Image: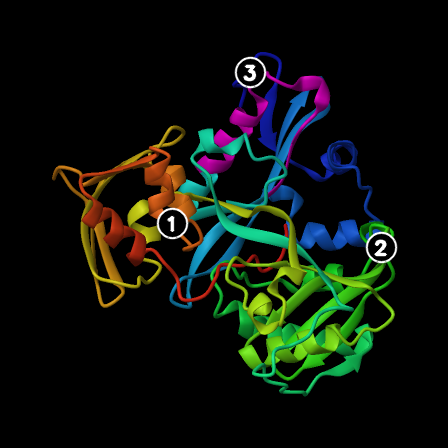
Amino acid sequence: MTLIPGITIRSATDDDVAAIQLLGGTSFGVVSEPAYTELRSQVFPTEEAIVAVEGGRVVGHATSTRMTLTVPGARTVEACGVAGVMVAPTHRRRGILRAIYTGQHRRTEAAGLALTIFTASQGAIYGRFGYGPTIRENAVSIDRRLAEFLPSAPDPGGVVLSTMADAGEPVRAIYDRWRRLVPGGQVRPEARWQMDLADSPAFRDGGTELFAFLHPDGYVLYRYHRREHGKAAVIEEMRAVTAEADIALWRALFGLELCSHVEAVLTDNDPLPYLLTDLRLVRTKARYDALWLRLMDIPAALTGRSYLRDLDVVLAVQDPFRNAGGTFALRIRDGIAECAPTTRTADIELGIDVLASMYLGAYPARVFAGANRLQAKDTAQLRALDEAFGAERDAALGWFF
């Protein structure tokens, strides 16, 4: 289809692969090895991609795959995972992204999927398409030399050293247990596991190869980097099904005596600071969004998760991009929701991007009310909405795409 003069928006073919790789290297600054590229094509097949073409050259691209996403209440919702969104630097401000996204979202609507998710490189672009950040991460650094556990902190033990060759099977099994419990966890395809565990030097950012700690209920994959203050152990992935596994793995990490710091990514309510005699040692270096989400079908999405309290409310949802908005009656009893369009007067008005941010429980409604991005008739309804949309576990991204 042609939505922009001179630009054709169409499905990608195998003949476009080299041009897509060139655009990807230009956009993201990484040129993947052939084996990595082949595995990625199994996760995101070429025929699922949409390209913008001018004069035979690929100047825009987005691809997608179907994902199974865990949502609050340890339930799952089928979602469209979008990746590789890019427009050539020579073709900015021409409407190419909107044209590609129009085609992409038409496909997702036709497939009947309730959600679209992606990991965003930039934060100022996607609100106008109805997306909101829905998982929050904190990059932290801990001075391992000073870290001491409180006397009350358990010492469960059970951690062993493992080679990466031996870690593959137990890591896969533990991750699958973990992702079933945690909002934001996704089923990870086998091709993606091979990509991650292959530990390509192109993605080490100057660090060493990966090392592994294993526990029956958790694992850590980490590598060493040189920093100004000395050597740091940088956690690439840490998953713990139980609190005991989490503590045991942190005790093992703080036993790495020949590094000065441990660097990690934590959710907002991670217990680590409260296990230590000095919680200030867990120093936040950056705070950012890890996943963006858009509700494609509001009733299907809202009935797909569970809730922390009963609620009766009418939501007026504005959608600036597609036609998913409207006025909906949301009724929750014992954590289970019913949601349908209604002609009743709205109790709460909000953008579909705000509802997306609230969806996994990481962003409270009251924050958006304070920013005047959510309007409630009274504070009691706002408080009830805020509490209902919470989650028993912090949302965390399962794997980056």
Residue 381 lies left or right of residue 104; in this view the side is left
Q: What element carries label 3?
A: loop
Q: Is residue 67 above or below residue 150?
A: above
Q: Which label number is shown at residue 4?
A: 3
Residue positioned 20% across, 56% down in the render: 311
> Mark 2 and mark 1 in contact (Cβ < 8 Å)?
no
Counting every numbered tag in the picture gives 3
Which amino acid is tagged 3? Answer: Ile
Whether residue 110 is visible to the viewer of this picture, yes or no, is: no
Label 1 CA crowd tier, 10 Å (few <14, some 14–19, many 20+): many
The residue depicted at 53 percent of the width and 23 percent of the height is 1
Q: In which quarter of the image is residue 238?
A: bottom right
> Crowdedness of circle 3 by 10 Å Cα count: few (<14), some, many (20+)?
few
Residue 356 in view of the camera? yes
Q: Nearer the viewer, residue 301 or 229?
A: 229
Choose the circle earlier in sequence order: 3 or 2.
Answer: 3
Percent of width and height locating residue 41? 70, 50
- Residue 229: which numbered mark, if any? 2
Residue ID for mark 1: 364
**Magenta-tinted stretch:** 83-106
Query: Label 3 to label 2, Cα distance in Å?
Result: 52 Å
Going from N to C along the chain, the mark reached first, 1 or 2, is 2
Check residue 84 for magenta coloring. yes
Q: What residue type is labelled 1?
A: Pro
Q: Residue at x 79, y 81 (%)?
A: 161
SS for tag 2? Answer: loop
- Compared to 356, does 126 lie above or below? above
Q: Distance between the residues labelled 1 and 2?
A: 37 Å
- Along the horizontal axis of the image, is 384 left or right of 319? left
Please name the amino acid that badge 2 sits on.
His
Q: Which of marks 1 and 2 is in front?
A: 2
Numbered disc in front, either 3 or 2 = 2
